[in-house]
Image (cartoon, grey):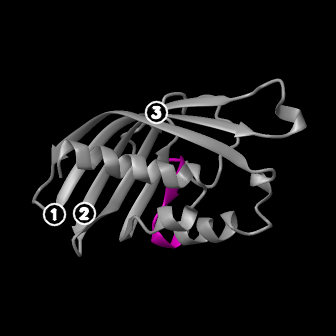
């Protein structure tokens, strides 16, 4: 994967989140893909430590089902997002069908309701790590790890996927 292909992949991935195309975003994951947002220690074992989100395939499907239902109260009114991606690095994997991408991200969140008029935006800087696997000539996410800079402090109400 070239630098330009890596950047385009990440731009497309966060673009799906910003459009709230959660099914399209979910389709980027490999069958055994994992989505992880650690709480504070980004190297801690997520099986033994708390996480903001730690979701394998079944949990991703469950979150997707809840996020697209009318019963997902946390997202009423909808939380709008804008993601920026920068400092993309391509790290060679174990073989040509596996690659790691590192990047910085800033996620801007806005909930358009009366309670939030005095606090326009939530700004969440993060570093990210993606492990991609080539499956049937397409790259799929084996791991998306989003490390919020302030993950050990205040985090606002988040959409189902950030």
Q: Nearer the viewer, residue 112 or 133?
A: 112
**What distance separates the C-alpha of mark 2 from that of mark 3?**
23 Å
Crowd tier of the residue under label 2, counting other residues whose Cα lies within 10 Å: few below 14, some 14–19, many 20 or above: many
Q: To which residue does mark 2 refer? A: 133
The image shows a total of numbered marks equal to 3
Q: Residue furthest right?
A: 114
Q: Tell me whether circle 2 and circle 3 mark residues in contact (CB < 8 Å).
A: no
Quick check: 137 left or right of 102?
Answer: left
Crowd tier of the residue under label 1, counting other residues whose Cα lies within 10 Å: few below 14, some 14–19, many 20 or above: some
Q: Tell me whether circle 1 and circle 3 mark residues in contact (CB < 8 Å).
A: no
Q: Secondary structure at mark 2?
A: strand
Q: Which residues are magenta?
A: 49-58
Q: Position of residue 125 (x, y in %)?
A: 50, 29
| Rendered view: 156 above or below 76 | above
Q: Position of residue 60 (x, y in %)?
A: 53, 66
Q: Residue furthest left?
A: 95
Picture quadrant of residue 105: top left
Q: Does residue 47 show up?
A: no
| Rendered view: 81 above or below 58 | above
Of callouts 1 and 2, the N-terminal one: 1
56 part of magenta stretch: yes
Q: Position of residue 122 (x, y in %)?
A: 66, 30
Q: Residue at x 24, y 44 (%)?
A: 4
Q: Secondary structure at mark 1?
A: loop
Q: To which residue does mark 3 refer? A: 126
Q: Does residue 102 show up?
A: yes
Crowd tier of the residue under label 3, counting other residues whose Cα lies within 10 Å: few below 14, some 14–19, many 20 or above: some
Q: Position of residue 104 (x, y in %)?
A: 39, 33
36 part of magenta stretch: no
User: Which dot marks residue 97?
Assistant: 1
Q: Tell me whether circle 1 and circle 2 mark residues in contact (CB < 8 Å).
A: yes
Q: Residue at x 67, y 44 (%)?
A: 80
């Amino acid at each position: 994967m070239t630098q330009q292909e890596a950047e385009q992949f990440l731009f497309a991935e966060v673009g799906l989140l910003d459009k709230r195309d959660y099914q399209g975003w979910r389709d980027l994951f490999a069958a055994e893909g994992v989505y992880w947002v650690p709480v504070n220690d980004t190297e801690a074992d997520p099986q033994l430590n708390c996480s903001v989100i730690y979701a394998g395939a079944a949990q991703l499907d469950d979150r997707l089902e809840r996020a697209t239902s009318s019963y997902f109260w946390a997202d009423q009114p909808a939380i709008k997002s804008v993601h920026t991606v920068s400092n993309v690095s391509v790290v060679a994997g174990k073989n040509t069908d596996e690659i790691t991408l590192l990047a910085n991200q800033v996620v801007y969140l806005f909930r358009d309701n009366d309670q939030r008029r005095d606090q326009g935006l939530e700004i969440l800087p993060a570093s990210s790590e993606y492990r991609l696997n080539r499956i049937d000539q397409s790259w799929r996410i084996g791991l998306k790890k989003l490390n919020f800079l302030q993950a050990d402090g205040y985090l606002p109400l988040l959409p189902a996927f950030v």
